[in-house]
Image (spheres, rainbow, N blue to C red):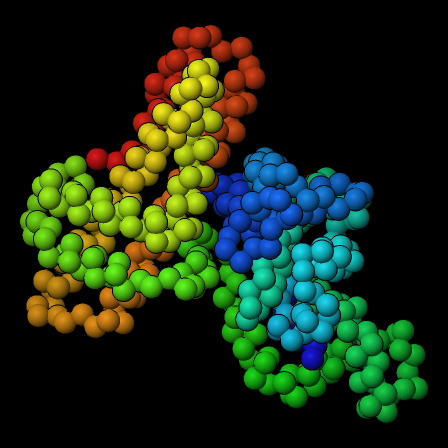
Amino acid sequence: MSILMYKQRFKPPNFSKTPKCNYAHIRYIATRPGASKNEGMSHGLFGKLQPGNLTEFKTWQEVAKEVRELSYKKTNIFRSVISFTPETAAELGLKDHSAWENYIEKHIHILASKNGISRRNLSWVCAHHNEPSHPHIHIVFWDKNQKTMKNFVSPKVADSIRIQLIKETFAEKIADYCRAKEKHKLELKEVTDDLVKDFDNYMKTIYPKEYKKLKEVAGRIDDEELKDIPIDSILKGIDLSPISIRLFQLKDILPKKGRFYYQLLPEEAKEQVDRLVEDLKQGIPHIKQLIDEYADTKSKMAMLYDADPESVERHKDKAIKEMDKLIANRLIAVIKTLANKEFELSKLEYSKEYKSYKTQQMICEILIMIEQNIDDLNLDYNDRQKSESTELSKRAKKELYLRNRDKGMEK
């Protein structure tokens, strides 16, 4: 079957948050659960920042930093997705990382030309997400010598890209379709867009369920903001019921009045919150992975001002405690919401499904919080690294360190 979805968009170049959002998007496509990783690396980002051989980048940060800098210069950073049904991906031989690299390298020129970008000015990076229900590839591309900022691109551009991708991806099937429709007298090398649309509609007709399902899942591939966390992939195989039970037990022992902050809790309640935070970290590997990443970056930042190698672990431990405290306060905020809800609805009985939903929602909020902190920290670290390349006095460095060492802590 020849079902292919294509989506394209970009953040407005003149919005103040666009550089940060574009940086975060690179991180998203490179590291999220389901991303097919480069061999021996913790991310799956590959592409070409200049004409030549395809590159599997050593770090996703090097690309994210470049995208951020270009965003500050008002360069349009296009985000796109090509998605297939599992059956179609298998039929095309898109079974591994290398096959997806070959596929997009062969077809990236379509995305560039339809958006008015010449090959010599094209820069692009990709990551393949091997989702069982909708294998897809994220592409981020831009014109490195762009002269004029774009505030609008017609939807017809994305549609024409999709048509051309179908034309080139399924050339043999289209030829077979033409013959079956008694159009063999046409010069097949001159396949028109109308003919491709006719072929595509035909495929939708004979595979209606598959097409509908792909359209639904492709519609959810909308990574405009960090809130779009693939929670099903992260929690696959994890039993949330023990965490749900503990969460609602905490609701019953926490104070009913007063300010809800970790620092102000009774010691018994603090111990319960601490244990739940630790169980979240141990029970959900993605949370622990993100905290470790935060601690690594935090320690690297601290080492810009502390030259003692033995201090690395101390800085990491401090960063982990900092993040534990942030998670604890997030837990308490969720519990406060539950308590208020119960007060409003009086004798509300929570079903198992409702408890599971609220637990998943809480985990999403925790992941969003950690990721936002990591992205802010990475941006901060890059800026500090740049400042360290200049001749700052020892006193200035000390003041900078003291001013920022507790950044991100909450009461």
Query: Could you say which is closer to the camera, residue 53 or residue 314?
Result: 314
Taking 56 as reference, is 99 above or below it?
below
Q: Position of residue 146 (x, y in %)?
A: 70, 42
Quadrant where the N terminus is found in the figure:
bottom right
Dividing the picture into quadrants, the one containing residue 247 is: bottom left
Q: Is residue 74 visible?
A: no
Q: Position of residue 292 (x, y in %)?
A: 42, 39
Left-right relation of 208 to 310: right
Taking 191 as reference, is 269 above or below it?
above
Dividing the picture into quadrants, the one containing residue 113 is: bottom right
Q: Position of residue 35 (x, y in %)?
A: 56, 55
Residue at 88%, 74% in the rendered image: 190
Dividing the picture into quadrants, the one containing residue 3 is: bottom right
Quadrant where the C terminus is found in the figure:
top left
Residue at 8%, 70% in the rendered image: 347
Q: Is residue 180 visible?
A: yes
Residue at 36%, 25% in the rendered image: 314
Residue at 69%, 68% in the rendered image: 162
Left-right relation of 272 to 164: left
Q: How many dots with numbers?
A: 0
Query: Could you say which is closer to the camera, residue 178 or residue 151?
Result: 178
Query: Could you say which is closer to the camera, residue 196 or residue 42?
Result: 42
Query: Could you say which is closer to the camera, residue 232 or residue 76?
Result: 232
Left-right relation of 339 to 240: left
Q: Position of residue 161 (x, y in %)?
A: 71, 64
